[in-house]
Amino acid sequence: MTRAKALYIGLMSGTSLDGVDALLVDLGGLRPAIKSHAHHEFTAELRRELLLLNSAGWDDCHRAAVAAQHLTRLYAAAAEDVLRHAEVDAADVRAIGVHGQTIRHRPDAGYTLQLNAPALLAELTGIDVVADFRSRDIAAGGQGAPLVPAFHAAIFGTDEPRAIVNIGGIANVTGLPARGSGGAVIGFDCGPGNVLIDAWAQEHSGELYDRDGHWAASGRSEAVLLDALLDEPFFAAPPPKSTGRDLFNMEWLTRKMAGRRYDARNVQATLTRLTAVTIAQAIERHVPKAADVIVCGGGAYNKTLLRMLAEECAPRPVAWSEALGVAPEHVEAMAMAWLAREHVERRPGNLPAVTGARGPRVLGCLYPA
């Protein structure tokens, strides 16, 4: 591979529905090097449509196809931005790795659906596109998620066991063994990250999300409600496991509230505590030797959530991934670039011990420019 062809673009839009993160990454060295980055927010109309497509509705197939076109044009604009900022030509980029927007994740039924139009993205950018990373793992009997533990192991490994926590719409945990110990990497979704926190804020405060966790900080956690929320079989289920909005949504929360009335601020505080508690419990059960906890994803910027997580994980220290050289909001987009590189090099991108697949598989489908 020539030096120029070590450049990849990673595109990520997650369950939080906040927008597209794009990175231009040089994967030719010992560690990934970010050349440029960009963030494009979803329009209110696209965000609303993507949220509606998470559940059955009228004319789903047509609406999903149209939404995928709009989403892909946003991907293309973000890719063009990172190229322009880095003063790099599209011809110098080996491939784009793009996750797509998850609207259904049902490995129990043998499928996962990410809205995307990778052929259009290849046409618009003139760059090879690698997409659909989850399906191959599911076809091999796995969960197809989480996707990033192999990447976490490649860049965040250390001489002591470590827990990596990604807090997007859904929270997931990667357990890294001490480097050279011969231990297995584990990873799994542990429950809601921002998905319920954001949904409650949108419905009761009129804001898209609870900025810095200020609203949650103004309330207090309700013990009875928290106990009811924790009474969910998914939390106690052993890995491999994955989840999404199919389970953790406002309907789920309404059922758990069982007609009881609470101050809206206290519900927000309780939902924030739920995310912290379920992450900490997952680490204690499945990564008990972790010396520290490294947090990435958009939820890392929720100060109240991070404070609660530090309380629940004590005495383990909790730190941002930025302490290891990668900003929290860049980790997943960088992982998409890395997965595209693994596909191009025909190396497996999954970890069977994480997903439950029958073996290592090359992930993704290639759409040549």
Image: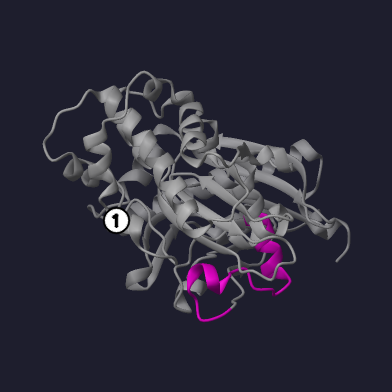
Report the side of 298 relative to 321 (left or right).
Answer: left
In this rendered view, identify the residue nearer to me: 138 or 367. Answer: 138
The amino acid marked with disc number 1 is Asp
**Please, is residue 185 above or below residue 89 in the view?**
below
Return the residue at label 1.
60
Q: The C terminus appears in which quarter of the rendering?
A: bottom right
Q: Where is residue 365 in the image (x, y as percent from the top left)?
A: 58, 70
Look at the image and tell me whether residue 101 can be seen: no
Report the side of 82 relative to 77 (left or right).
Answer: right
Q: The N terminus appears in which quarter of the rendering?
A: bottom right
Q: Where is residue 173 in the image (x, y as percent from the top left)?
A: 52, 53
Residue 297's quadrant in the figure?
Answer: top right
In the rendered structure, does residue 358 fall within the stretch colored magenta?
yes
| Range of residues picked out in magenta | 336-359
**Please, is residue 78 above or below residue 348 in the view?**
above
**Please, is residue 149 above or below residue 263 in the view?**
below
Residue at image location 69% in from the left, 54% down from the top? 160
- Check disc 1 and report its element: helix, strand or loop: helix
In this rendered view, identify the residue nearer to me: 185 or 135. Answer: 185
In the rendered structure, does residue 320 fall within the stretch colored magenta?
no
Colouring convention used in this rendered image of the protein: one colour
Q: Where is residue 103 in the image (x, y as percent from the top left)?
A: 38, 54
In this rendered view, identify the residue nearer to me: 133 or 367. Answer: 133
State the residue lying farthest toward the right.
3
Residue at image location 53% in from the left, 57% down from the top? 287
